[in-house]
Image (cartoon, rainbow, N blue to C red):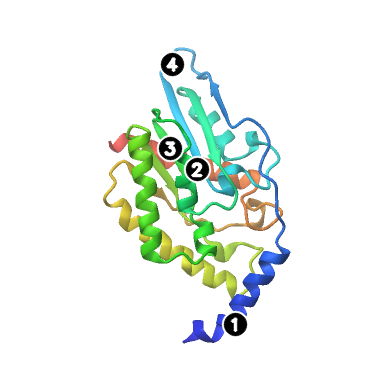
Amino acid sequence: MVTALLWPLLLWQGKRLRKLAVRLPEATGDRAGSIAASNAAQQSVLRVLICGDSAAAGAGIASQQQALAGYLTRALAVANSVEWQLVAQSGLCCNGLVKLLQGLPEQRFDQIYVSIGVNNVSALTGNRQYREQCRELLTLLSTRFQSPKIIISAIPPMQQFTALPWPLNQWLGLKARLLNKVLTQELAHWPNAVMVDAKLPLSPELLAADGFHPSAKGAALWAQLLLETAATDCEQT
């Protein structure tokens, strides 16, 4: 009932936000490369794919070195040599990411880090449709890239995005939580995949100038949380 009463306001706020939102460019710099292990005695090579939406692409951050891919790959290179690729594009929903990844050749990755879902929230993707899209993505990642470890970032708490006005922020935050629950249910069938939901408050310094994407400081914290989960999960397996 409350949602029905607020719906005209939510629609107006959404349209106004799309019209006035700051469109930040994706981070510049290499989207593939290799890094030698910091430990000279370490000979193993870790093959890593980072993929997803504008957050993975580093929107609002000057350089890929200061974005998620840069922080992840440098940290991973402490213990292993790393060969990495970044495949990300602003505006992607989950099904858009599937189409983008279908353009990659079949190859082996040891770890795949995924950022997706915010645009599904904005697009009002239904729960069943989102689960189907997630299943399609997980199937593609697992079969095309030789059963890697898949680390998926939960949709962040959108109610804390400073770009979003009330009550739109609260409604989108609720939608994000519902889609995260859908993904959690689907992941019960995928032992090679895990979702990282840090549930940390998003202070202003963790957000870029648009109040929507992670800042360089936010990307560094994000990478740290993903790596902690990946390390813990590897120890358990």
Circle 4: residue type = Gln
Mark 1–mark 2 CB contact (< 8 Å): no
Circle 2: residue type = Leu
Circle 3: residue type = Ile
In front of the other: 47 or 161: 47
Q: Position of residue 23 (x, y in %)?
A: 70, 54
Q: Which residue is mark 2?
A: 100
Going from N to C along the chain, the mark reached first, 2 or 4, is: 4
3D distance between C-alphas at marks 3 and 1? 40 Å
3D distance between C-alphas at marks 3 and 2? 15 Å
Quarter of the image for residue 18 reads bottom right
Q: Is residue 35 left or right of residue 141?
A: right
Residue 8, disc: 1
- Whether residue 72 is visible here, answered yes or no, is no
- The nearer-to-camera label among 1 and 2 is 2
Q: Which residue is mark 3?
A: 112
Circle 1: residue type = Pro
Going from N to C along the chain, the mark reached first, 3 or 2, is: 2
3D distance between C-alphas at marks 3 and 4? 21 Å
Q: Which residue is mark 4?
A: 42
Q: Position of residue 112 (x, y in %)?
A: 43, 37
Q: Residue at x 58, y 63 (%)?
A: 160
Q: Position of residue 120 (x, y in %)?
A: 49, 60
Q: Is residue 142 left or right of residue 199?
A: left
